[in-house]
Every structure is written in C-alpha cells, then in structure tokens.
Amino acid sequence: MTGPPRILTENLRVVNVGLSSFADPLLAIETPVMTPAWRPAAGGNEVVGMALARLLGDAEVDTANREALLRLLASEPRLIGVAPAQEAMPMLQGRALLHAGPPIEWTRMCGPMKGAVLGAVLLEGWAQDIGTAEELLDAGGVSLRPAHDAGAVGPMAGVVSPSMPVVIVEDARTHRRAYSTLNEGLGKVLRFGANDAAVLARLRWMSDHLGPTLSAALERLDEPPNLKNITAQALQMGDECHNRNVAATSLLTRLLAPKLAGMGPDGVEALEFLRDNNHFFLNVSMAACKLMAGAAERIPRSTVVTAMARNGVDFGLRMSGTGDEWFVAPASKVAGLYFAAYSEVDANPDLGDSSITETVGLGGFAMAAAPAIVGFVGGTVADATRHSREMRRITVGENPEYRLPALDFAGTATGIDVRLVLDANLVPVINTGIAHRVPGIGQIGAGVARAPMSCFKAAMLRLAAG
Amino acid sequence: MTGPPRILTENLRVVNVGLSSFADPLLAIETPVMTPAWRPAAGGNEVVGMALARLLGDAEVDTANREALLRLLASEPRLIGVAPAQEAMPMLQGRALLHAGPPIEWTRMCGPMKGAVLGAVLLEGWAQDIGTAEELLDAGGVSLRPAHDAGAVGPMAGVVSPSMPVVIVEDARTHRRAYSTLNEGLGKVLRFGANDAAVLARLRWMSDHLGPTLSAALERLDEPPNLKNITAQALQMGDECHNRNVAATSLLTRLLAPKLAGMGPDGVEALEFLRDNNHFFLNVSMAACKLMAGAAERIPRSTVVTAMARNGVDFGLRMSGTGDEWFVAPASKVAGLYFAAYSEVDANPDLGDSSITETVGLGGFAMAAAPAIVGFVGGTVADATRHSREMRRITVGENPEYRLPALDFAGTATGIDVRLVLDANLVPVINTGIAHRVPGIGQIGAGVARAPMSCFKAAMLRLAAG
C-alpha cells in the first residue's frame, strides 16, 4: 500500500486497511504492518471505506497532493498595499457584500452576521436605518456572496463592503492576489455584529484615514513586507498567527513606523491604532494564508484541503481536486474559555474565515508555538504541543519555513489530506474566538473547534465518484 | 536543617550535610533525608565545608535571603527618561569614565575595553587622537571606575562617558534609580572596542539626536513604560531578555512610536534605529535588572548575589550581606558558536555587565523562554529548558511575574543563594556575546559562560568569618 510521501521516505510503517490477508506478503518480509480497528466515520459505511481504501492506494492522488503542497509552500505572500475593496476586487461593485464561510442566504444567517450585514448596508449608505436596511435585504436588494469567491477572507462575520479598505497580499512570483479587511480591534466591532454609531464611525475613519495612510506608508517602503518572513519570526515569538498575533503585529508596526512617522496626524493615529490592537496582524495573516491555500487549488485528483470556513450556521470545506465546490455541514460548537458572565448558551456556533490559517498549518496546527495561548483558548501547554503533533498525522508534509521551537524546530503540519483525516478519524483542530449569538455583544470567549467529519467524507466521495 | 523557603513550603526534602547522625531524628519521624556524597568545590577543603554547613543551617541567613528575594521582587522598574550620563549620575563629572565588571586599572584592561576607553576619550574631546589619548590614560589622567559603583550597567566593555545618553530606570515605589547606555546596534560599535570615525559619529548622533528624542517621547507618554510588564510579556514571546530582545524591543517601539511620530525627522530617524536594532531593549533590560538587584543589596547575613559582572579579565561577584565588596576570579572562556572565520583563539574572555540579567533570573536562567536562542548560543532546545530547571536548585525562590511557558509557566529561578551554589556545586549559567580580543572587530559569536566557583567560595567565607 502506498502511503503519503513523508511516511515512505522516513521509515516504512504500513497500515493495512481492508482484508487482513493484504498484510501477509509484507509480514513475510518482516515489515511491520498495523491493522487498526478502523471503521469509517459513518460507522461501517462500506461505500466510504472502499472509496477511501482505493484513494489511499492511488499513486496519482499522492502525486497530486505533493504538487499541491509544493505549490502552497512556493507561494511568497507580500503585503503590497491597502485599497478600497471595490478597487481591489472587481466582483464587489454596486450593492454587493461579501461574508465569511460557505454561501448562505440572508434569512438563514446567524445573529452576528446579520448585524454585520446591516451595519455594512448603513455604512455604504444604501439605507438610513436598520429597518430600511432589513427591508432592502428581505427584498433581495443586496448581493451576498462568500468572501472566498472574491479571493478574500474575513474574520468572524467576515463582511466586506465596497468602501472598506482591504489589505492586498500578492505572490511575489505569480502575482496572484488575496485580500482581507483591516482588523477593527476588540470590543464592539462589526465582525461580531455590532453596528451602532461608534462602530460605523470607526469604520469610516478606517476608510477615510487608516486605509489611505497605511497604503501610503507601504508605498514608501523599499520593498513590500515579506509576510512569510514575519510569520516565521512570529512563530518563534509565541504567536500561532490566528488567535495570537501580538508578535507579528509588533514586527509589522516596527517596519511601518518610520514611514508612518512622516505622515502627520494620520500617521500618529495609525500608530496609536497599531499600538492598541494586538490582533491587527490577524487579517494580514489570513490574507497571506488565503494566498498560499489558493496556490494549491484545482489540481486534478488532489485531496488537499484548500479552504475551511464557517458562516456561523454551516461549516464549509473546499478541496483541491473538486475545485470551487463547498462541502457543507452544520457549524460546530466551540469548546473553550468564556469571559466573565458568559457561557456556552450564549455562544454562536463556529464562525469566520479565519480557519484559513489552519488550512495552511497555522493556528491550531501551530499551537505548540504559542503556549501562552492556552490561557486564552483553554487547555494546558501539553495540549498545545499535542495538537501540533497530532495534526502531522493528517497532512501531506510540513512547512520547512514555519518552524515550531517546542517541537525541536519541526515545520508546521501543512497540506491537510482529506484521506488522512478519514483514515486517522482525526479532524483538523481550529483555534477560534467565540461570538455571542446576539449581534453586537462581541467576543465572549475563545477556544478550540473541530472541523465536522462529514464534510471530509463528502469531499472524498465526490472525488472518488468523479 | 532549615532549607530555603520554597523547599520548606512545598515538600519537606532534607539534605543532610555534615555528620550522618544529624539525620537520625528526622529519619525517626519518617522524613526522607538525602545524605549526598558532597564534597566542597575546593576538593575537601575542611574550612569551606564547615563554614558552608554552618551557614546552610543558619536560620538568620534564611530569613535574610527571603527578605532579599522579597525586596528584589517588589521593585517596579519604570523607564522614566533618557539623559546625558553626567546629568543622571553625579559621580560622572570631569574626566571620568565608567566600565563594565569589577575594578580594573587601565594597563590591565583587555583589548575591547581599552579600545572603548580610548574611543570615549576621543568622543569627549579629552584627546584629539589615539596616541594622545593613550598618553593621557597612561598618565592616570582619566578616572576609571566600575559602572556598578554609579548604579549603572553596560554591555561588553560597558564604557559610559559623561556626554553619553543613558536610560533612567526608576523604582515606582522607592524612586531608587539605575542606568545604562543606549544600545548602539551590532557591527563596529564602541562596546566591542571599535573607535573609528563612524563609531564616534554614531555616538554623537545618539547624544545629539537619539537621546533627546527618546527623552521627549518618554515625557509625552501618559505613564512611563512598565519594564516588568514588558519583560513578562517578552518571556512569553521568545526573549530571555539578555541575548534575545527582539520581542521586548518591538513592544517598546510600539509604545513609543505614536509619540516619536510627532517629532519630525529626529522621530523618523529614531524609529529607523529602533526598527534596525533587535538588541535595543538589552540595555533597558540591564538597567531594570540592576534596579531589581539593587533592592536586595546590603541585607546583613544575606547570601543572595547582587551582582555578577565581567571586565574581560576578571569576573566579579557581589553578595548582599557583604555589601560593595567584589569577589574576583579570572573571567571564564565562553563555550559557544562562532561566526564564520572566527574561533576560540580569537575570543576575549567573558566580558560585560549584562550578566546582571542572570543575577535576577533572566538570560541563561530564563533560557527555556527562548528556544530560538539555541541557534545563536549553541546547544539544543532541551539544553535551554534544562538550564532553566537547573538554576532553580541554586536560587532562593522564583519570580511569579516572570513565567516560563515551557516549564508550565513556572516563575524564573530568582535570587541566587551563594550557599546553594556551593552546596549543589552548580554555578550560574550566563548567556553572552563573545567579543574578539582585538579591539574593534566586534562580536564574533555567542554562547554560554559559567560564573567561576571560587568567587562564591570567597564570598561565603567572608560572610562566615564576619
């Protein structure tokens, strides 16, 4: 049986799935064979088991996955600019909004996403009050599409409207691009569904001042910030670049500060904002990850995951070999720590595009880099290390540039292989914030979510069938 | 026998030193007693052994050491300003210079320190060229004293001259102060003995521009930077605050940036300097550590170390109960990694006041916080963790605010007890840079040094005798 490349080259350790007699020839030559008490996630679904066994033994899939990993690793995300979303993304013209996760219609959206969509409608001036905004949305007067469809990603509700400034991340070699909004900070913010006057005022300041100021500062740099480099450094500095971004935010600020310093009061305000927002780099990290995941898209036969995204109702998965198709399951509950006065009954199910970081080996996959995060998402330092180790069982390989000190500088597990997820019966771990289900209350905790197994099964079956 | 407080409160684990019959009463009540095959470091020196046994059993020393640790931990270093050394330190008037380590006369100084002293003489305009400067020094025309005598510390040669800007660190409660120069960056710098025109030009820019600019920025802050807070954060971000300071430098820069941004071209240049110097925080860390160590000084009977400092020829130790007396031994060789083209034959013996960081539980004592540093000082991630664990054997307690993620957030080992160093036959580990022995070549490597045991023995004997 042909395993993924890492196993073959390091040490031959055979797992026999199927008839036990398959193992006999190997046992005859004294090669150890493990025959696990494996059962398909569906609980004995023969179709799934047979399809998986076939794909696990398919050398074409192995080759395609290696290619997916190589392309992902070869991408070189640079932060080349900041611009209004409607200038950066041709798709975002007229009354159009983007949202996090797989497609979802207005009526099915969760509370925080509805709040964010309403806020964006007000921000854009398509309605003057919430009531009118709701009527407009009920009447289908606003196009609502996943940010992923525009090469963009947004945390939590992930709403992007035409006038919002977005970071533009470009691959240094191919010039492909990916986008994300600017992080608003904590407290009452649009991404958690808040849409009051203060939230809209901050968003207007971001459009009118912060965005143009950052754009000008980036233009004045000799070369655009190398996001792979900043991420690699941040992993040595306690960030996992999803829920913890204080190091990367600080490094990026140090890089931009001399340019912002020459830009008058707007520069000062931008530096104050960067000083006070330890999560500023999150959205930049997400755009860089989207760019890297995008490099692995649409490789025929590849079972590598190219997107995991949540809209607060559904979890969606995209896989390289099945292109833009979303494989969807109900969004998970998040196991985590709640801020004072909140508990699980207040929590919205898993929400946001930020799991694009796990898709390329950061976040939960790189948790060993960020022991301090266990104080935030729960668990122990040993749990953090264990998550990073475990994720190595479900990936094609590792990222030699993203190293984890606590694992003796092993690279982060990268390139989730849908086959391995099913075979190991182990789903990706996702570090995430927890939103209150009522719009506008904001973040009420943080924790660890698990991607739902059924999406992986569905993706695998589609490839097996095709 | 009374052990240090940590041992007593956590679990009673008795080590019997001396007559084996001492253990009998404890064994009778089923308390485990370890009678190690201990021999004094001198190899059977009865005087040392007897004195140590007596001090180890001295409850007065225990009480004094607990007090020393409490005072050290209670100090709250804040970065309150930057000013010319001669304004900050009354001692530094006229033709006076400070240097690293214990006292040393001009003729005995090592190469890098001689180079730095000559550079400082030129910088201050006391001579116009190296030859004249040497004559002035040979004639005893310049007062040379340890920086420690002025409450200051300097890395490597540690030379402080009257016009140089120094950081002023003040205890929020007692208003005691400590000082250090501003870090010059890497390459050809005075602290490694370089004194050419470019080095002096940079020092003049630091006096004329960087110092006053940082001073003004600090004045504009609502409150002075809390250095304990920055250090505690940096320990969660891969710094050990001696050889690795990238996180702390970035955090401090983020704090100062909005103020520097409002200060014209000097502010821009200061931010460029902070952007390019990952070691900027080293000197600030050193001054904060000097302040903390100073809090533990001059407590009668205390065997807690209050300074470890190297002048490149001698290593010097100060102990709380023996006041300002230096206990001196030849400076050690540094075991480490050399930059390309250099080796141990090029290395100057251990140099600089930066071991004040180890004196209060940072640097080598906090190496578990900085796994990435093993790529710089040599060794493995496991070595780094082991050093931090081992140092717990020779300290009075730990610092609950300086936590090490890799040790499950245990505090750093703090308050080196000279008795425990001798009893465990384990000297402090010191992370350090390695200077070329020829002035001006600069840093040629980094590594781990060990404090010489004989200083600890001498200090202990002095206290025992007194």
Image: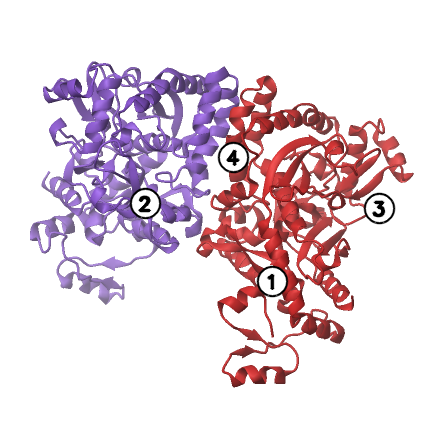
Chain colours: A purple, B red
Q: Position of residue B456 (x, y in %)?
A: 71, 62
Residue contact at pointers 4 and 3, CB within 8 angstroms: no
Where residue A231 sits, quadrant-wise, is top left
- The residue beneath circle 2 is A340
Is the residue B423 above or below the residue B107 in the image? below
Tag in front: 1 or 3: 1
User: Would residue A284 be seen by someone viewing this image from the given angle?
Assistant: yes
Residue contact at pointers 4 and 1, CB within 8 angstroms: no
Of the numbered discs 4 and 3, the one sitting upstream in the chain is: 3
Under tag 2, what secondary structure? Answer: loop
- The residue beneath circle 3 is B105
Of the numbered discs 1 and 3, the one sitting upstream in the chain is: 3
Q: Position of residue A462 (x, y in %)?
A: 12, 40
Q: Residue at x 46, y 43 (%)?
A: A236
Where residue A152 sits, quadrant-wise, is top left
Under tag 1, what secondary structure? Answer: helix
Residue contact at pointers 1 and 3, CB within 8 angstroms: no
Is the residue A96 above or below the residue B63 in the image? above
Tag in front: 1 or 2: 2
**In 3D space, how far apart are the residues under numbered discs 1 and 2 (Cα atoms)?**
40 Å
Q: Amino acid at mark 1?
A: Ile
- The residue beneath circle 4 is B250
Return the residue nearer the eye: A333 or A194: A194
Q: Chain of mark 2?
A: A
**In 3D space, how far apart are the residues under numbered discs 4 and 1 (Cα atoms)?**
32 Å
Mark 1: give few (<14), some (14-19) or many (20+) Cα within 10 Å: many
Is the residue A344 above or below the residue A112 in the image? below
Quadrant location of the N terminus of chain A? bottom left
Q: Residue at x 57, y 44 (%)?
A: B241
Tag in front: 4 or 2: 2
Q: Amino acid at mark 4?
A: Ser
User: Would residue A221 be seen by someone viewing this image from the given angle?
Assistant: no
